[in-house]
Image (cartoon, grey):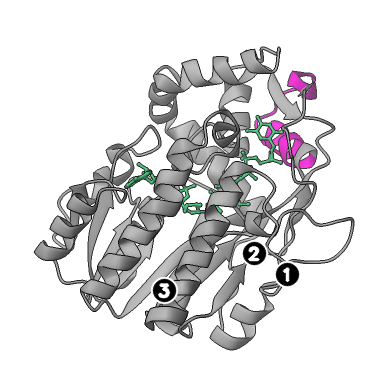
Amino acid sequence: MQILVTGGAGFIASNFVRYMLERNPDISIVNFDLLTYAGNLENLADLEKNEHHVFVRGDICSRQDVEALFSEHQFDAVANFAAQTHVDRSLMDVTPFINTNVLGVQILLDACRANGVNRYLQVSTDEVYGSLGATGLFTETSPIKPNNPYSATKASADFLVRAAHESHGLDAVITRCSNNFGPYQFPEKLIPLVIANAMEDKRIPVYGDGMQVRDWIYVIDHCSAVETVLRKGKPGEIYNMGAHKDVPNIEVVKSILSILNKPESLIEHVEDRPGHDRRYAMDSSKIETELGWSAAHTFGNALETTVNWYLDNRDWWERIRTGEYASYYEKLYGNRGKHCS
Ligand code: NAD
Ligand code: DAU
């Protein structure tokens, strides 16, 4: 079985490629990634000599790149992880989000149709549902109400995937996962940012009151959920994925500081993110009951494993933080009139 994984030099998909190759000696993966600021071949260094893994640099927004890829390889399945993923960046410039997250998805759908690919899996997000009130959970039938430019582009993609299935009979499935954390997450996202800032005794920016709730899942559980849907999901269906661990941001931050034995005085409440969703919490009962998947990792243990990974791989994130990311971070807090380092 040959699978195309897009965005495989990023956080989740680099973990997914490794996860799949470790468990499935009969599959081969072509990993197609543009290597944007978030793509990093260091994330795949241990797979360099793996004969079942081929890396191809290319852009899902380029029909030329995608057609060349599909003419060279025959794919049984496509798992599209490639995306612009950071909400704060989408608030500053939505153009790359529209290109990759919307146009890029349509180009992949067209290529799958033209080449008779058996299964297309779109990696979507719980953010398409918008925000919950104080109670309740997102189900697959919750209204689609994205509140920020990133989630609006992801929701748009989901509609294009649905249309490809309904209009053209493409075997397509959509996965909607909650907030991931784990090794190789780019240190602009909350958990790796807090770990890195704390290790450097820098202030930790908490947006607003820090009482926004996210439903955290260890990245390996997301990988196993995607494999489950890739293999067993029903065509045209949507599957929510979460780990039943919805926690306010401030508690996540305090847990990390406690693991690292750092003081809570590092926390700085800064201006809130515009359009900040208050609470996400997933109902994953569909994938659990229909496909037999459930999250295997507990939040506390996985958080410790993650903190230890960042302790052991300081070079990895230090190189990132002294590069392009540094000027982005300055711009982000410059825009909000706050400096957090
Ligand atoms: P990431 O930002 O770490 O990685 C994205 C990858 O996509 C990078 O390697 C980048 O180079 C690549 N890419 C970007 N534009 C591309 C293009 N035009 N062509 C080819 N490659 C391109 O992202 P992530 O956090 O690993 O997220 C992966 C997917 O999972 C995304 O679709 C995201 O929406 C979804 N998702 C993420 C989370 C989360 O918590 N991080 C949760 C649910 C869903
Ligand atoms: O829910 C799934 C989504 O999770 C994915 O679709 C996105 O690609 C991914 O980036 C992530 O989005 P969030 O906006 O939830 O993740 P982020 O790590 O940016 O923020 C998590 C929470 O922490 C959010 O409520 C904002 C807050 N936050 C974030 C940062 C970076 C802070 O308080 N301070 C910060 O410095």
**Residue type at tag 1:** Ser
In the image, 319: left or right of 254? left
Q: Earlier in the sequence, mark 3 or mark 1?
A: 1
Q: CA distance from mark 3 to mark 2?
A: 26 Å
Residue mark closest to the camera, 1 vs 2: 1
Residue appearing at x 50%, y 21% in the figure: 328
Q: Earlier in the sequence, mark 3 or mark 2?
A: 3
The stretch of residues the image draws in magenta is 251-268
| Quarter of the figure that contains the N terminus | bottom left
Q: Nearer the viewer, residue 38 or 131?
A: 131
Give the quarter the ligand 2 occupies.
top right
Query: Callout 1: helix, strand or loop?
Result: loop
Q: CA distance from mark 3 to mark 1?
A: 21 Å
**Residue type at tag 2:** Gly
Q: Is 112 located above or below residue 275 in the figure?
A: below
Locate residue 38, reporting x and y percent.
40, 37
Q: Which residue is mark 1?
A: 142
In the image, 205: left or right of 287? right
Q: Which residue is mark 2?
A: 242
Residue mark closest to the camera, 3 vs 1: 3
- The residue at the far left in this view is 72
Asked whether the residues under the numbered discs 3 and 2 touch, taking CB atoms below 8 Å apart as contact, a structural biologist would say no
Locate residue 198, reporting x and y percent.
63, 24
Circle 1 packing at 10 Å, graded few (<14), some (14-19), many (20+), is: few
Asked whether the residues under the numbered discs 1 and 2 touch, taking CB atoms below 8 Å apart as contact, a structural biologist would say no
The picture quadrant where one finds residue 150 is top right
Residue appearing at x 60%, y 43% in the figure: 149
Q: Which residue is mark 3?
A: 164
Query: Callout 2: helix, strand or loop?
Result: loop
**Quick check: is 237 in the magenta stretch?**
no
Q: CA distance from mark 1 to mark 2?
A: 15 Å
Circle 2 packing at 10 Å, graded few (<14), some (14-19), many (20+), is: many
